[in-house]
Amino acid sequence: MSVKKPSPQWKKFQPSVQDPAILSMHSNASVVNMNVNAEIQPPVPKIRETGVIDKKQHSYGFIQCCDRDARLFFHFSEYSGNIEALKIGEAVEFQMSFDRRTGKPVAVGVIKVDSALVSPEILNEEKVQGTIVQEAKVIKQKNGTLPGVQDGLGRVTYVHNGECFFLPYGLDDVVPSSAAPPKTGEDVLFQIATDKRDGKIRARNVESLESPSQRFAGVVCSMKDTFGFIERADIVKEIFFHYSEFKGDISELELGDDVAFSIQIRNNKEVAVEIESLPEGTVIFEDIAVEMVKGKILKMLKSSNRRPSEALAGRIMYETSKGLIEIPFGEKDQRGECTLLQGDTVEFQIATDRRDKLQRATNIALLEETFDYSGDIRETGIIAALKDGYGFIYCAERDLRLFFHFSEFMDLTYSPRLQDELQFTVDQDPSQPTRQVATRIKHLAKGSVSFIKVLPAVYIGTVDKEPSTHKNQGKNKEGEPGNIIYDYEGAIQQIPYYLKDVTDQNNLPHFGDKIDFQIGELKSTGKKQAVKVRVVLRNIAGRCHGFVATIKENYGFIETADHEKEVFFHFSSFNGDTNDLELGDEVEYTLARKSSKVSAENIRKLARGTIPAD
């Protein structure tokens, strides 16, 4: 079984000439010769390089450069640290200079660095299958020097495009988890490493195919008819799997499930095999910082139909002690689905991927301070209707029932209720350009929203018609308004009012009563109505007397004291228990006009004989 591999740079393993164990600085083959008699040396760019300690003597040593094919002399006085603790093979950083006496290049300003940060190689991620043709051997150090570069190396062969190639490897290239170093003839998997200094290649991370397979972990990220893909937890990569490799009921496997698996090479590609479910939460891709960070959106995500390379296309800028920093974010990184715009102030947390250490912003939430400078025109209203996931708002500033979706609430913990008061931004519906919708919605405290602008002037008027005491089930749920007449600059004016606009609900004004009021303008339409209506003087002269002439189910008629006509009344207008009302009872009442007809209101039963007999 073969795998498509990167083209090698040589076919046979050719050992290079052995480097002498001890070379003097003056005869070092890798040092560039210069004019000894030169009095002035050319300036050397101050570039820091990395390398590995190749050799140590009593007062000096040599460094093998990692990024170029060179071996530099250094004196112990140039090392910043305990020279006794510095060991052969350890990584260092240095600057190249020239010896004043010989003109040869030397290393100065030598410091020890983390070996994990220094590598003279580029490692190909793809694994290659091959066969061991020569085993690697253990070679001991002699006289404090490292063995030659080819000492003890083994060889592995593999086929690429019909040709057979050989690569060297050492015992330190064998995967530690292997039970034993692979033997001659064994099939192995390995990765190809290219030396940045000379372009030579070798095998790394060699592991036997016959050894127990290594287990990996990941999350199911895609599922098709008979196959899917797993996002790996060890590297930033997805791996293919067939449903037949799942050890369990495939119908129970879902997107987002944590799984464990092994890897095999099939048709020159890595595939996941022996897949098993793991407990939820086992696989963790990233670490999320607890601290909340404040920033500003520089770039928004354009659409959901973006390429994989644009998965983190959004950008947020935030301030740190080292200056301004940009951080990416993706479509799943917002907390909720409230509309976000470029320039918005947001808070977020920083997530660091465990695999490649890349950072991104997540749990992004819109901050209310955005509206202090964003230029958004914020409007108010109350919830008029609620459906499954959406609703409608009665707008205070415009004559409109505005659609909204629950996803636009800034507070994810808020549960909307009828008559709740809201603040929002009006925007065009992206799916229906002719329709407007409410976005970036904030829940307000009760009493925050006013539909009417109250003018300061106070007027005196007379109740010409009382409002309906029963709410209609139709469009106008406030019922029929009453009517007030008043004098304004010598002209008689009329203005409607509703029961809710009476200040004292226990002292309602009646027909003919003197009242004071203020004028309110509806913000949405500009229409005027009386508000803060208050009784100033009762219409005492308007009290009438009569006899109960007719009693029906919930209404009746009163015959006037002069017996000339009958006046309609509703039981709700009687001050008392209507069960005590009988035909012929003497009553006192006032007249009111609630529609086109006059009716009796404020009916009070009188003692028999109160009304003089004719």
Image: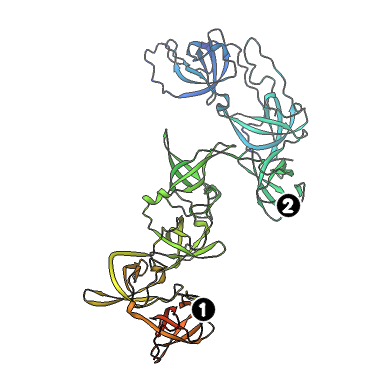
In the rendered image, the vertical position of residue 44 relative to residue 366, given as above or below: above
**Residue holding disc 1:** 578
Earlier in the chain: of badge 2 and badge 1, it is: 2
Instruction: Name which quarter of the figure residue 505 lies in.
Output: bottom left
Front one among 190 and 202: 190
Q: In this view, does 428 lie to the left or right of 208?
A: left
Q: Residue at horizontal 42%, vertical 23%?
A: 46
Label 2 residue SS: helix
Q: Is residue 494 left or right of residue 602?
A: left
Label 1 residue SS: helix
Q: Distance between the residues labelled 2 and 1?
A: 70 Å
In this view of the protein, can residue 275 be seen by the observer?
A: yes
Q: Where is residue 455 in the image (x, y as percent from the top left)?
A: 30, 65
Give the residue type at disc 1.
Thr
In the rendered image, the vertical position of residue 170 relative to residue 243, given as above or below: above
Crowding at dot 2, Cα within 10 Å, few <14 / some 14-19 / many 20+, comes out as: few
Q: Position of residue 381 (x, y in %)?
A: 43, 62
In this view of the protein, can residue 428 be seen by the observer?
A: no
Front one among 433 and 76: 433
Give the residue type at disc 2.
Glu
Q: Which label was assigned to residue 252? A: 2
In the rendered image, the vertical position of residue 366 relative to residue 204, given as above or below: below
Crowding at dot 1, Cα within 10 Å, few <14 / some 14-19 / many 20+, comes out as: some
Front one among 257 and 488: 488
Q: Where is residue 434 in the image (x, y as percent from the top left)?
A: 44, 68
Q: Position of residue 393 (x, y in %)?
A: 46, 64
Q: Is residue 27 left or right of residue 558?
A: right
In the rendered image, the vertical position of residue 423 relative to residue 345, given as above or below: below
Q: In this view, does 351 lie to the left or right of 184?
A: left
Q: Which label was assigned to residue 321? A: none
